[in-house]
Image: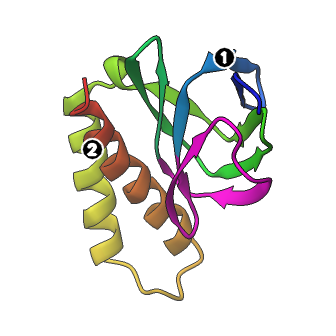
Amino acid sequence: MPDELMLEIVTPDRLAFSDVVEEVTLSGSEGEFGVLIGHAPLLSSMKIGELNYTKDNKKAYYLVGEGYAEITGLKATVLVESIEGASSIIVEEAKKAQESAEAKLAAMDKDDLDYEKVKKSLDMAAARLKVSQKV
């Protein structure tokens, strides 16, 4: 049985995190799931939401964009559009972004070409607010 779980978080720009952790929790497209040492192999798409991990009995919280996660018994590789630490989120900006996206969506028809883009920005703002409360 392996005794270490390696977590790597990669964005299009950089390797955002690479270290051994005790556990990681991800926002899969089918729901939140946790990964511990020795997890069965898994490939999952990820939705906008929270990613947290425990290292040295301390939790760290992040907001991540959409992406994919590949899990093996020894390693969790997370490929996401973006990552933002909970402590770096500016709550007032997130609230303004959420209000703006809500107003735009209210005035749009679901057939509008920009509907999904605005919906995604609303999801990101809501998730940003939720993750910011974890600090």
Q: CA distance from mark 1 to mark 2?
A: 26 Å
- Give the left or right position of residue 10, taking residue 125 as reference: right
Q: Which mark is residue 130?
A: 2
Residue at figure coordinates x 38%, y 79% from the top left: 108
Q: Position of residue 37 (x, y in %)?
A: 65, 35
Report the front residue among 114 and 29: 29
Q: Is the C terminus in the top left, top right, bottom left or bottom right quadrant?
A: top left
Residue at figure coordinates x 71%, y 59% from the top left: 44
Residue at figure coordinates x 23%, y 42% from the top left: 96
Is tag 1's residue or tag 2's residue first in the polypeptide sequence? 1
Q: Amino acid at mark 2?
A: Lys
Q: Is the N terminus in the top left, top right, bottom left or bottom right quadrant?
A: top right
Position of 80 relative to 55 (above/below):
below
From this viewpoint, which residue is outermost toward the front?
A: 1
Q: Position of residue 114 (x, y in %)?
A: 55, 70
Is residue 30 one of those drawn in magenta?
A: yes
Label 1: few (<14), some (14–19) or many (≥20) C-alpha neighbours in 10 Å: some
Q: Secondary structure at mark 2?
A: helix
Residue at figure coordinates x 27%, y 64% from the top left: 102
Q: Position of residue 38 (x, y in %)?
A: 71, 40
- Span highlighted in magenta in the image: 26-49
Q: Secondary structure at mark 1?
A: strand
Residue annotated with mark 1: 20
Position of 93 relative to 127 (above/below):
above
Q: Amino acid at mark 1?
A: Val
Position of 103 relative to 21 (above/below):
below
Label 2: few (<14), some (14–19) or many (≥20) C-alpha neighbours in 10 Å: some
Is residue 101 one of those drawn in magenta?
A: no
Q: Magenta: predominant secondary structure element?
A: strand
Q: Position of residue 61 (x, y in %)?
A: 40, 28
